[in-house]
Amino acid sequence: MSVRCPAGHQSKATDYCDVCGAVIAPAGAAAAPAAPAAEPPSSVTEAAVRCPHCQDLNLASALFCDSRESLRNEAGEFARAVAEGAVPGEEHIRAELGEVLAGMAPGRRDDGELTLFRSLGVAIEDLAAAERAVATARERGIGTEVEL
């Protein structure tokens, strides 16, 4: 049995798309409730969806990424936007996250600016998250340390 994901891919998995990772709602399931109205948006984060058919890139936002190389080679929606002329290419990227954190590039310029962080995942982010998780567990006295 196969089903179609929201992007239209045939998927053998029935709860997520095995092509692009999109969540597939069970047949007959109620639609997810709408998110409550928010103040003007400030930031959007898109996580590692590597689908050449997906078109979720918000072109009106200031675009940040974890890696220009990953964005160029793995983000289908970015490649599609470039191919269709919707964005000029890498010059549409304001900065990599590391450049902003190191003070080499500006982040959000004012309270009204919408930013998009397009994350495809790089190992240093995983390491930083793991380091923080271990530190928090130690602070709270929870978890089990295993010596390898």
Image (spheres, grey):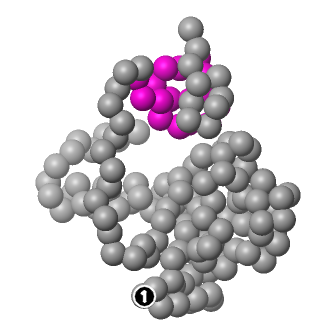
Q: Residue furthest top?
A: 1
Q: Position of residue 16 (x, y in %)?
A: 50, 29
- Name the residue: 77% across, 66% down: 86
Q: Is residue 97 magenta?
A: no
Q: Position of residue 118 (x, y in %)?
A: 59, 62
Magenta segment, which residues? 11-26
Q: Position of residue 24 (x, y in %)?
A: 47, 30
**Image quarter of residue 94:** bottom right
- Name the residue: 42% across, 29% down: 25
**Image quarter of residue 135:** bottom left
> In the rendered view of the protein, which quadrant contains the N terminus?
top right
> In the rendered view of the protein, which quadrant contains the C terminus?
top left
- Name the residue: 45% across, 25% down: 15
Q: Amino acid at mark 1?
A: Asp
- Mark 1 — residue? 111
- Name the residue: 16% across, 49% down: 142
| Secondary structure predominantly adopted by residues drawn in magenta | loop
Q: Residue furthest left?
A: 141
Relative to 72, 16 lies left or right: left
Crowding around mark 1 (Cα neighbors within 10 Å: few <14, some 14 to 19, many 20+) is: few
Q: Is residue 23 magenta?
A: yes
Q: How many marks?
A: 1
Secondary structure state at the residue bearing disc 1 = loop
Relative to 91, 107 lies left or right: left
Reply above or below: 48 against 101: above
